[in-house]
Amino acid sequence: MKETMEQINISQYMPIVIQWATNILLAILILLIGIWISNRIYNLVLGISKKYDRLDDTLFRFLGSVARYVVLAFVFIAILNRFGVQTASIVALLGAAGIAVGLALQGAMSNLAAGLMLLIFRPYKVGDFIDAAGRFGKVTEIDMFTTILQTFDNQKIIIPNSQIWGEQIINHSYHEVRGVDMHFGIAYGENTDAARKVIDEVLANHPHILKDPAPFVEVETLNDSSVDFLVRPFCDGAHYFDVLYSVPEQVKKALDANNIEIPFPHRKVILVNENAS
């Protein structure tokens, strides 16, 4: 009689055990398949950036991670559903939590959105020299929230992307060849052709100034006390600052050597003696 009761009890619990065992096995199977699919999607998204060199790896790593976690979230919900958990309330709770987090992190979200736009349109890349958000420096890192610059005096500047996107961005490294604008003034009594010849010789002898395109040297302005030349030599972007900071001194020395006067502002003062009459 006792054995019969034990058999009855076992037979009563067997369907529940089988059901739970089935659910556990199916949950493990769903989890494994979900992980495999999420990894495949991540690699697929990342492969797009490798296929096209113009696209930024950082952006596609972020998009791949988002796609992976979205798939894993659905896998988690599917697993809970296998065990009879009502997932509708969980989805609603996650949605409400997402809204609350979004409102609390508005600044971070704006930086994220700006970072996405910067990585998509790529107005600059790592290694470029840029003017942005009132700062100038070499871009050392671009992530989803910030852009990091290194200045000439070796400072590290971290700029939130929201301060860059939507404002003026000057990329000094976008073109391989750069024009370097400089201004030089000579006295009105000097010969402009002679001064132009001296400046042309300085530019022709500079090791980093290109012959093609040819330098531009012309009179730009007739100022109060000087005739001003606009001088624009062209060079490789890597030599821009070398040309900018070396040519003015060389032009000054060459003009002095050729006795061409470089004027400075003069002020004429007239003294009136009111007691003279």
Image (cartoon, rainbow, N blue to C red):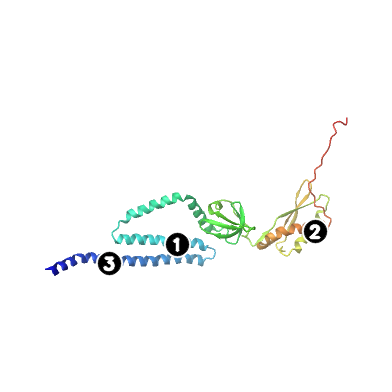
Numbered disc 3: secondary structure: helix
* 38 relative to 236 in the view: left or right: left
Residue 206, given in percent of the width and then of the height, sits at 74, 63
User: Dot 1: within a 10 Å radius of its alpha carbon, few (fewer than 14), some, or many (20 or more) residues?
Assistant: some
Residue 29, how many percent across, how many down? 33, 67
Report the residue that reaches farthest toward the front. 2
Left or right for 160, reference 263: left
Res 274 → quadrant: top right
Q: Which residue is identified by label 3?
A: 22
- Visible residue check, residue 197: no
User: Residue 178, relative to residue 273: is it above or below?
Assistant: below
In this picture, residue 139 sits left or right of residue 79: right
* Distance from the alpha carbon under mark 3 to that under mark 2: 91 Å
User: Depth check: 213 or 202 in front?
Assistant: 202
Q: Please state which of residues 194 and 185 is positioned toward the viewer in this rendering.
A: 185
**Mark toward the start of the polypeptide (3 vs 1):** 3
Question: Tag on residue 225?
Answer: none
Compare residues 88 and 198 and report the one nearer the observer. Answer: 88
